[in-house]
Image (tube, rainbow, N blue to C red):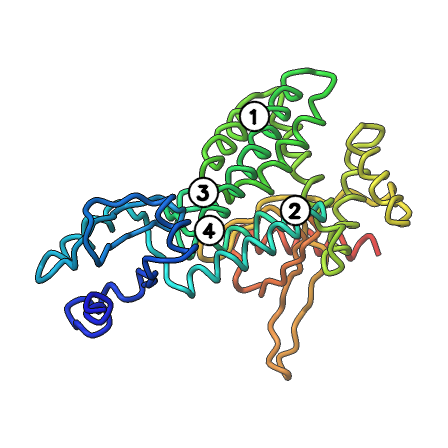
Amino acid sequence: MALLNRLQTDQSLARYAGWFIPLKIETNGEEWRKWASQYRHQGSSIPIVYVVRADGKQLYARSGSLPGPELPLMIEQVLSQAGTVYNDQQLQILKSSLDKSQELLDAGDTAGAVREFSKISKVGALGQLGSYAQPAVQADSFAQKLVEQGRTALTEANDKLGQEDSRLEGALALAETKRIYSALPPLRNDIVAAANAARTNPSLRDTLKLAEQLDEARDLLQKPAGQRRAVTALNRIIAENPGTPAAKLAGDWLQAENITPVPSVAAPAFRAWTSDRGTTIEAALVDFGYGDPAAKKDPFVVLEKRDGQRVTVPFARLSAASQALAKEDVKKSRAAE
């Protein structure tokens, strides 16, 4: 067939090679009858040229071999209706991420599903891939499903935030929604707006901050590498908020992991620590070292953030004001020993 041979040998058409799958159908037999009953064409001569999109929509169907410039002109015309064309490697990324995301979602790990699904952004916009290839269509559908789940979670969180008797529950739901769904572009702005509105509301600000600490600790508690930090953070919440619903939640989560809460943990002195470069973190000084000139080791302090994460900072890297505070805390610590 001259047309098929041209598609395979004409170098001017080489750039289209990966965008079409050429098929040859003889105009007799059952296969042709099924094809012709589904796709109608113009003209009565042979060859008949069809172009069918990945979703089955007919884009072109006419008699004639399309000589000279007619063939590339037709190709350009149908490509304008073909959507985004992804190569085999990109389609494999879509399929792999989609399969793993669905598996995680089925197992109840929505956060993991969203993280895995976010890898699709290497190929195209989440939920807006613009392709008719099956993996892309399925990925867009899955994105819509996640967005709907996230939007429902955000609505429920906002509803609970608006009621005094469910304020902590709503703040915790908002923190969880932010952690899980912020990677989805259609939801990101709405989630940020809801969190900002809560932070600027004097009656919600402290509750939201506490809920974010609870949510982060609960997430860490499920990860072997994060359990130590989670236990520290939850015990701190219990110590700083005795008798509150937040303290009860923290205690319940620890007991569910067969960890005995330690409500007597002393609340550390949190303050802002500034480096010599002007960066600042909120933390408490929990340890220090005098250094060893012989071993070329400088003095250092260990700062612990509210989530239990510890950061070792060379003493010389603190600002002058923070160095003075560190010396004061060290003196207090040594006096209490």
Which label is found at residue 134?
Answer: 4
Which is closer to the viewer, label 1 or label 4? 4
Residue 122 image offset from top left, x and y in percent: 42, 57
Residue 111 falls left or right of residue 185: right
From the image, tell me which residue sits under label 2: 105
The amino acid type found where label 4 is placed reads: Gln
Residue 42 falls left or right of residue 250: left
Residue 112 image offset from top left, x and y in percent: 63, 51
Residue 210 falls left or right of residue 124: right
Q: How crowded is mark 3: few (under 14 residues within 10 Å), some or many (20 or more)?
A: many
- Label 2 residue SS: helix
Mark 3 in CB contact with mark 2 (< 8 angstroms): no
Which label is found at residue 127?
Answer: 3
Most foreground residue, 28 or 200: 28
Is tag 1's residue or tag 3's residue first in the polypeptide sequence?
3
* Distance (Cα) linking label 1 and label 2: 29 Å
Mark 1 in CB contact with mark 3 (< 8 angstroms): no
